[in-house]
Amino acid sequence: MRIIFMGSSKFSLPTLKTLYKEGYELMCVVTTPDKPKGRGLKITPPPVKEWAREHSLRVFQPDNLKKEEVIQFLRHLAPQVIVVVAYGKILPGEILKLPPLGCINLHPSLLPELRGPGAIPWSILLGKEYTGVTTILMDEGIDTGDILLQEKERIYPEDTAETLGERLACRGAKLVLKTLKLIQEKRIQPKPQKGEVSYAPLLKKEDGRIDWSKKASDIHNLIRALNPWPSAFTFYEGTRIKIYRSSPFPQEKPSSPPGTIEEVGKEGVGVSTGEGVLKLLELQREGKKRMGVEEFLRGFPLKPGTRFT
């Protein structure tokens, strides 16, 4: 089977690696252009490009998929199917029509729940117990295509967007492989999406600002959902502090207004919330690395009775 693979992020890699290992004919790996990254704004290639180059795969990085020369280039490759995993760009109709077997997309949710690019963090943010992976036959909508296969995945209490994303990426790679085999054998029937539709837009940095008047469990979910990026944050005496790990105690009744530091110790920093107490376990102040609470407190003492704002 002649395949064009389209993907950019780390989430894309397990599927690309699986297709390569299984011996599929990868005509080209299409990914996004290199971008400036980090404090030094160093031009950095997408993870998919680095891996593809290491394995001598052809790489193509168009800035605009609607250009006629881009469409002609992809048409010349004559793919039977295009596999799309976290590519980051919308495919125009001209490209969707190119492969005779269609364009297959892997999405990290149980569609039609959580359509959009932020499905993984939103599944945690909303406090869901389950999410999943879905392969769809792409159309011109955003994650609206007919469902090919779908599998459920548990969200564990300790999961972050990073750990859940890694698990979904690996499970999704196997689902893509299964989907392609069933397509080859003509043993799969696309089915229209059914059920309640919801959307998961990309989270922005400002979405990480902690509102201490919310429930401890909701703030805890925010911290998990935004770990590692863009990260939940608060302020202490004018210093911005990111929070990466926490533990909620919803039954405890706060004795002080929301945001007040109630206790400080090597086991955690207890903070009052609108409902319950939240214990902070891993923090990072501006210009420093992420630290466990004990190490953090050695360099930046927090005092009981003072408040996060």
Image: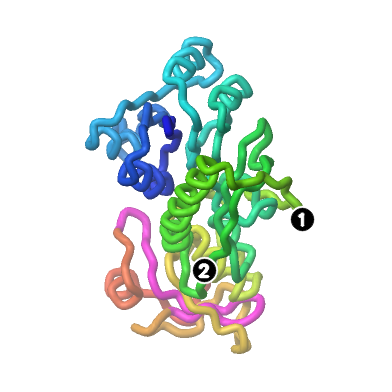
Q: Residue at x 26, y 32 (%)?
A: 53
Using the image, determine if residue 266 lies above or below residue 297.
Answer: below
Q: Which residue is mark 2?
A: 308
Nearest the camera: 278 or 183?
Answer: 183
Visible residue check, residue 230: no
What amino acid type is highlighted by mark number 2? Answer: Phe
Residue 111 in percent (x, y) is at 66, 52
| For residue 92, above or below residue 118 | above
Q: Name the residue at 56% across, 27% down.
A: 100
* Residue lying at 50% horizontally and 65% vertically, measured from the top left: 224
Q: Quadrant of the N terminus?
A: top left
Q: Please name the amino acid that badge 1 sits on.
A: Gly
Question: Where residue 226 sits in the image (x, y, percent)?
Answer: 50, 58
For residue 44, above or below residue 135? above
Front-most of residues 53 and 282:
53
The residue lying at 57 percent from left, 64 percent from top is 152
Which residue range is magenta in the image?
Answer: 269-288
Q: Which callout, 2 or 1, points at the residue further toward the start of the chain?
A: 1
Q: Which quadrant of the rendered structure holds the C terminus? A: bottom right
Horizontal relation, residue 3 to residue 196: left or right: left
Q: Main secondary structure of the magenta part?
A: strand
Left or right of 137 on screen, residue 80: left
**Measured Cα–Cα span from mark 2 to mark 1:** 41 Å
Left or right of residue 122: residue 175: left
Label 1 SS: loop
Q: Secondary structure at mark 2?
A: loop
Q: Label for residue 195?
A: 1
Q: Position of residue 60 (x, y in %)?
A: 37, 24
Viewer-side residue, 169 vs 298: 169
Give how far across and how far down residue 82 sits, in percent.
49, 32
